[in-house]
Image (cartoon, rainbow, N blue to C red):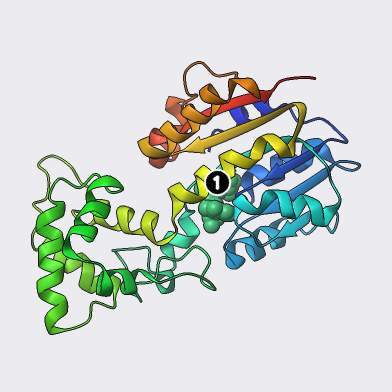
Amino acid sequence: MLPNEVLHWLDPKPGQVVVDATVGGGGHAALLWDRLRPEGTLIALDQDPAMLANAQKRLPDPRINWRQRNFEDLPSVLDELKITAVDAILADLGFCSDQMSDATRGFSFHNDGPLDMRLDPTSGEPASNLIRRLSEKELADIFYLYGEERHSRRVARRIVEARQKTPIATTGHLADLVRSCVPRSKGHSIDPATRVFQGLRIAVNDELGALERFLQVVSECLRPGGRIAIISFHSLEDRLVKQAFRKGTEWCKELTRKPVQASDAEVRDNPRARSAKMRVAQKHPV
Ligand SMILES: C[S@@+](CC[C@H](N)C(=O)[O-])C[C@H]1O[C@@H](n2cnc3c(N)ncnc32)[C@H](O)[C@@H]1O
């Protein structure tokens, strides 16, 4: 996502220390490493062990520091590596298409699989647990706030009725329930289950909480003059980033007055890029 824009704004140079906080498929990491090597340092994090392993296969360079961690733990990762501050940080939020297309991960309403949705499958609660134990109101709030689903109450009611008969343990079961009570919007090809699945994924992974905690620690991780770029896909994420960079004026200056968006050519190749917004801030020099 936004590959040229990331390189332009972070401007990584040979020998610098850079963090890719969400390495995913390794696309950005490959570009960054190309600029940094051989003396530079790339620290590559992902909370999903499968994505980290894939990226490691794609970039089999033993000099890269791979860590399976949540990005909110960046200060302790830097401590472990005995690095006091870094030149640049990139966070490209959300999930990757590889995670979506693997039915066993439970993100997809197209392929039936266990209703899991954890980015780190070794910790936290799978989505099926939330669907089983949350109240109708709590579920409706998740679908409305994180999924922006207008029919959130209707969906929550349908789920609560259905779970009294049988547990909702698969993506197919949940998607069918949503489709049975949310009308397909006219003229749009989007599946009626899209927004409910998005809301649930954000809740399962506490994505907004992790982003808030990350934004609180980045200033201590950057060297004076260092830069951070965050690519978000959801208006609530973008709002948190915008507030942190504006409110944080005592430690940083937002370099992008308006969020950077993908070019028409990138959106043609990858429709998901349409909703990507990148903001960049620079820590004040001492
Ligand atoms: C959009 S993908 C990143 C794509 C990557 N920039 C590339 O070029 O391939 C987002 C990745 O961030 C990871 N992720 C999401 N939230 C995270 C968090 N709080 N800490 C660490 N990794 C996270 C996901 O597991 C996923 O692999």
Outermost residue toward the front? Answer: 250
Image quarter in which the C terminus is found: top right
Q: Residue 24, percent across and down?
A: 58, 54
Placement of 216 over or under 108, stated as above or below: above
Placement of 106 over or under 5, stated as above or below: below
- Report how many numbered discs are placed on residues in the image: 1
Q: Residue at x 52, y 22 (%)?
A: 246
Q: Residue 218, percent across and down?
A: 65, 38
State the image quarter where residue 133 is shown.
bottom left
Left or right of 78 in this view: 23: left
Q: Nearer the viewer, residue 96 or 41?
A: 41
Outermost residue toward the top? Answer: 257
Going by the numbered disc 1, the residue's amino acid type is Arg
Q: Residue at x 23, y 77 (%)?
A: 168
Q: Secondary structure at mark 1?
A: helix
Placement of 286 over or under 54, stated as above or below: above
State the image quarter where residue 276 is shown.
top left
Q: Quick check: can you spot residue 262?
A: no
Q: Nearer the viewer, residue 13 or 132?
A: 132
Left or right of 130 in this view: 80: right
Q: Residue 176, percent across and down?
A: 16, 68
Q: Quick check: can you spot residue 139?
A: yes
Q: Residue at x 14, y 70 (%)?
A: 160
Q: Residue at x 46, y 26 (%)?
A: 261
Q: Nearer the viewer, residue 125 or 43?
A: 125
Outermost residue toward the bottom? Answer: 166
Residue at mark 1: 213
Left or right of 256 in this view: 235: left
Q: Residue 272, percent across and down?
A: 40, 41
Outermost residue toward the right? Answer: 39
